Image (cartoon, helix red, strand yellow):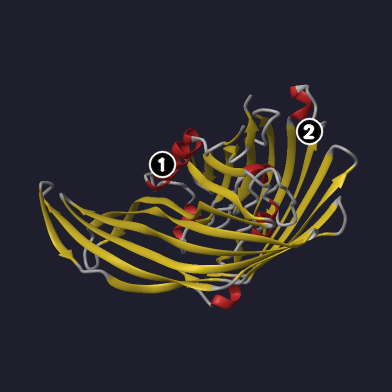
Amino acid sequence: MKKIKIPSLTSILVLIASINAGYSQTEALTSSPYSLYGLGVINQTSIGKSNALGYTGIGLKTDSEINNLNPANYGLIPQNSFFYDIGVTGEVNSYSNRSYSEKKKNVNFSNIAFAFRITEGLGAGISMVPYSDVGYSLVGIQSNVEGSTETFESAVTGLGALSDLKLNIGYSLLDNLRFGLSASFLFGNIEETESFVISNSALSITETTNYSGARLGYGMQFDLNDKFTIGSTMQFPTSLKGSIDRSITKVIEGSTSVTVESDEPDTADNFDLPLEVGFGFSAKLYKSFMLSADYKKNYWDATNQTDLSGSYVDQDILGVGLEYIKNKSSFKYSDRINYRLGYNYDTGYLEVNKEKINGFNITTGIGLPVSRSSNSMINLSYSYGSKGIIENVLIKENYHLFTLNMSLEDLWFRQRKIN
């Protein structure tokens, strides 16, 4: 007698709970002072093992997990497999300039994703990851009251994030050629509060800017042979529409709070995202090594955007990663552990005082198999990164980033015989 195995109730509940966690997350995803500009710090972390491989994966061919960096790879999802990935990040930042240094910590949800096969050679998936993060604070700014010797103190804080909800579809046109399409919906808000204190009175101005928009993308992968794969991606330019909610509150003599102004939502300047192109390859070396490398170019110059004392400039990103697995099929658990190492260099997309805010990351990590009967993996990664320089008003930022990804596979509709 044959029976059909229905989807695991546990996996569905975990997925729903994770999506709810993503929507209820705190907005303080970063504490970088460079999140003051534009939409904040653009997120580099991805899904699964790519975080330990220098954030590479455009040319990475895999049928055992989600590769969110190239939609073409979704065409390799095997029959009866349902993949999902849940991620958490922890970050320790240190900032310094000529006169002070500071440390901050953040722990947050990083992603939720799932993928499945539709039919032979056709797969799809949905993911949600942070697109950009905002979390800055400028306090104790002393200024003079015009026309008098009296001074006042001001502070500016920013908080928020934009999320990228993406649908990916991949199709295997030939055994060695795959194409993919992606459609993103980006949404979120940035709240900036500016406070002024004079004697026992204070004035607080809060502006919440809401952004939303859609974006299309393309991907391709081609297997030159069974050991070497090349890939390419493209994210088309788009414009995010903005609106502002503004409120002004005044506190008189330290006790009475009066709402001076509370406006209806107003339009804000749109924010333009650039054309982004990427190329990558992966190669199997000997029996146990896999090399992955990516190059990305983001054409920010074409958006003609400026922000405060900064301007947006073309960005180049180069990443390389190496993975070692002694024997994926071994009965010995230690032989099936994945060891990873990577490097990523980013020329930066922001120029302040004629200095580009570039940076680099050194990444490492391991993949711990859950069982021999599935492709489920616990992916742990660590990254040490640095950006900026100590010069004039610029700040040097060093950070340690830890990621935990539960990259799991559930086997659906598998037939089995019962005597």
Badge 1 amino acid: Ala
Q: Which residue is tagged 2? A: 328
Residue 203 lies left or right of residue 110; in this view the side is left
In the image, residue 365 lies at what x, y percent?
68, 36
Q: Residue furthest top?
A: 332
In the image, residue 204 lies at what x, y percent?
23, 56
Badge 2 amino acid: Lys
Q: First in sequence: mark 2 or mark 1?
A: 1
Residue depicted at 64% across the width and 41% down the height: 383
Residue depicted at 77% across the width and 50% down the height: 292
Q: Which residue is tagged 1? A: 21
Q: Residues within 10 Å of mark 2 (few under 14, many from 20)?
A: some
Q: Are marks 2 and 1 in contact (CB under 8 Å)?
A: no
In the image, residue 209 lies at what x, y percent?
34, 64
Element class at badge 1: helix
Q: How far apart in space, not on screen, are marks 2 and 1 (Cα)? A: 33 Å
Element class at badge 2: loop
